[in-house]
Image: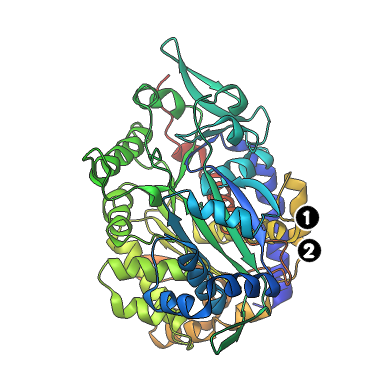
Amino acid sequence: MEIEEWEKHYVEAYTNIKDSLKDIRGVFVAYNSNIDAIKHINEDEVKKLVGILGCGAIQEQIINYPREIKDPVDFMARLVISMRDGKAAEVPTYGTDLNEWLMDNLVFDHARMGGQAGIMSNLLANLGLNNVITYVPWLSREQTEYFVDSPNLKYPVVEDGKLVLKRPKDAYDPDQKPKVNWIIEYSKGTNISCAGTCFEVPRDNRLIISSRPEWLRIDMDSELYERIPQIRKEIDGAILAGYQMIKEEYGNGMTYRHYVEKAVNVIESLKACNPDMPIHVEFTSIQNKVIRKAILTDIVKKHVTSLGLDTVEVANALNVLGYEELAYSVMSRDEKSVIALYEGAVRLLKDLHLHVVNIHSLGHFISLVSEDNPVDVEDYREALLFASILAATQASLGGISSIDDAEVGLKVPVYEKGHEDLNSLAAYLVRQGICTMEDFEDGCVNALGHSLVIVPTKVVEDPAGTVGIGDAISAGTFVAMLTKIKDSDKVKCPE
Ligand code: GLC
């Protein structure tokens, strides 16, 4: 399909979805909200930090590839790796020392809502959804200042044995400390040199240093858990994120199994009167492989309907599921990587019993949709186009404060290269007899047992920031898809 025709589909998708968002009763969003301290780093600042720590030490840690940040050298090693590859990463830090060092050596530019659940909750509230019920197990006073203060964004609390939906600012725990993450953003074209290694940053992206204070738990208060049935009638689906914070072991002898089980109980309770209720899990960069695997095989598999990931995360997921070679091919720089991406997505869809796998890459989105998904491929394509508009809006403006802001994203042109990058996948699918070139061009392919929906996306040349773009894509796809589920398919819980 020619770019002009895609643009027409974009306009249609925007108008249709915008008008139907009001049909969604609501969405439940949990678990991770935090405060992001954002710093855009430039060449001179990198040079300064390298000067303080010494190139030799950093180079050594680059080879060791730290999966946890224990000191400033670990931090710089992961920053250089992320900048060298232009790939986003999130690495945990368990103490408070790094925060102090960063405060002393690299003051942040500004703070804003962070965490996938926090960002998605604000976005959905700003889009005007009837109900966004947000939940974070660590709601501090400081955190509430970053939530949109609007009547459709509600926080569940139990008072006198009853469930009450309040605004976050009226629901916080005064003794709770805030969780603050550092986001180091960098721009394409930045030149880095360290001990003879010189490179130019290939892409705008960021490194996230995720603080993991000792009190952090991905959990739900038992009083609230018992009242999930009352939340059900306010929602048509749920988006869950933040499981990456589960630890293998806790000081009190508890292990990850306890929190995995509780996470599954929450999902099962949400689905109690509608086993097909759409439940989306947003994947992310998860350093610990035991946790990464447990999230996929114990939480996602059989319990949730859709999974959202970027290219690197697909490779990481395949890796722990035993598909090392495929994971390796996904990350290769040759043109076969997009074929591996497709084959990897098929594995995820089948092995994890999902209805949908959403993969967002720079320039295109690829979704695999199983026969069990209640939405047909043309409607799903519309959902992806809507998500791309939101992503372009987020990238242009750095945030979305109302659905009308999306007009800005709609004006961003479709990225031609994104379209071209799919040529090798198209040739492969045609060669395999899976589809014709025309089907592929339309973005809707019916393969054996599943469909493939592919759209070229709108890419902003010089984004205002990169944090939150993936969240806008996933939340956008999810709610757009909810608007397409017929009323007759939405099982209502008895009052
Ligand atoms: C992760 C990070 C958070 C960031 C978010 C962006 O949740 O922990 O700091 O805001 O990703 O998607």
Q: Residues within 10 Å of mark 2 (few under 14, many from 20)?
A: some
Label drawn at residue 407: 1
Task: Where is residue 363? Give x, y as percent.
Answer: 61, 73
Tell me if I can see residue 431 in this picture.
Answer: yes
**In the image, residue 132 lies at what x, y percent?**
57, 34
Circle 1 residues within 10 Å: few <14, some 14–19, many ≥20: some
What residue is drawn where x is 58% and y is 49%? 480
Q: Which is more toward the observer, 166 or 406?
A: 166
Determine if the C-beta at disc 2 is less than 8 A from ligand 1.
no
| Mark number displayed over residue 79 | none
Q: Which residue is disc 2 drawn over?
A: 411
* Residue type at tag 1: Glu
**Is the residue 241 above or below the residue 202 in the image?**
above
Name the side, left or right, on which 404 lies relative to 430: right
Image location of residue 69, percent across then percent down: 43, 60
Whether the residue carrying mark 1 lies under 8 Å from ligand 1 is answered with no
Q: Amino acid at mark 2?
A: Lys
In the rendered image, the vertical position of residue 102 relative to residue 479, given as above or below: below
Locate residue 165: give its quadrant. Answer: top right
Camera-nearest residue between 325 and 409: 325
Query: Considering only vertical position in the picture, is 177 above or below 466?
Result: above
Q: Residue at x 50, y 83 (%)?
A: 426
Q: CA distance from mark 2 to mark 1?
A: 6 Å
Quadrant for the N terminus, please.
bottom right
Count of labels in the image: 2
Picture quarter with the C terminus: top left
Asked if marks 2 and 1 touch (Cβ < 8 Å), the reply is yes
